[in-house]
Amino acid sequence: MNGNLGGSVKALVFDVFGTVVDWRGSIIREVEGLSRAKGIAIDAARFADDWRAGYQPAMQRVRSGELPWTRIDDLHRMILDGLLVKHAVSGLSEAEKVELNRAWHRLDPWPDAVQGLTRLKRRFIIGTLSNGNVGLLVNMAKRAGLPWDVVLSAELAHHYKPDPEAYRMPPDLLGLAPAEVMLVAAHPNDLAAAARQGLKTGFVLRPLEHGPNRKPPDTTGHHFDVTAGDFNELAERLGA
C-alpha cells in the first residue's frame, strides 16, 4: 500500500485499551498482587474479564442519558464496587479500593508498542483517541514510556466512542482534514465508526487481548486502509 497513504496522513491517533496496552494481563497482575497482600482468594483472570465486561454497558448508560457525563475512572469504580460483591471480596479499605481502581492507570504496553510508536512519531503526529479520561491516559503514558505528542480523550468531547463526536474531535483540534487523520485500533467496529466520519483506518491485530483461548476479532466485511501485525510493521507500511 501504503506509500501514498503515508503521504496523505499527517496524524495517527490510537485506541489505547487493547491496542496499545495489555489491559487483561495488567489487571490480572494487579489483582494477583492484591490477593497475595491481603490473603484473599480471587480468580484474577475472571475478575479482570468481568471488570472489562462492565465497560461498554457503563458507557452506554452515559450515551443513553441514564447517567450524566461520567469519566471512565468513575465508571470503573462503579463497576469495581459491584465486582467486589460478586466475587465476595471483603475487607478492603477505601484507600485500597481507590488504589485498585487506579490499576487502569498502570497498564503495561504490548512489547512492540513503545518502539513502534517512537518510529511513527518521527514522521507523524501521534496521540491517543481513547475512552479513557485524560488523567488516566497521562499517568499510563508516563509510567509506560508512551511517547505521545498529544493526549486526546472522549472526555474532551463528552462523547464516548463510537459516538461521531469522538472521531470528529482529533481533526478539529489538530487543524486537519478528517482524511489526514488515521485511527489505529485492534477493534474493527471502532475503525468502522471512524471511517464513517472520514478518518483513515489502521487495523493492528492483538490476538492476546482477551487471553490465549479467545478467537481474534472477526474482520469479515470490514475494509481497513492498512493492516499490520504490530506497530513496527505499521511503521514499515507507512514509511516511518
Image (tube, grey):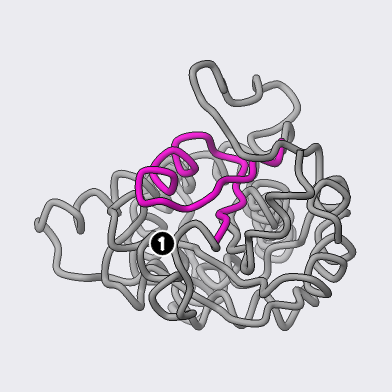
Residue visible at 52% across and 34% down in the picture:
188
Q: Is residue 40 left or right of residue 117?
A: left
x and y, in percent, of residue 235 in the image = 83, 55
The amino acid marked with disc number 1 is His
x and y, in percent, of residue 81 in the image = 36, 59
Q: Which residue lies under the disc numbered 1? A: 76
Q: Nearer the viewer, residue 201 or 47?
A: 201
Query: Callout 1: helix, strand or loop?
Result: helix
Residue visible at 57% across and 75% down in the picture:
137
Name the quarter where the N terminus is drawn: top right
Q: Which residue of the protein is positioned furthest toward the left in this rendering?
A: 66
Residue 70 lies in quadrant:
bottom left
> Per the image, is 59 magenta?
no
Q: Is residue 13 above or below residue 44?
A: below
Name the quarter where the C terminus is drawn: bottom right
Residue visible at 79% across and 52% down in the picture:
238
Q: Is residue 63 left or right of residue 41?
A: left
Magenta region: which residues?
A: 181-205
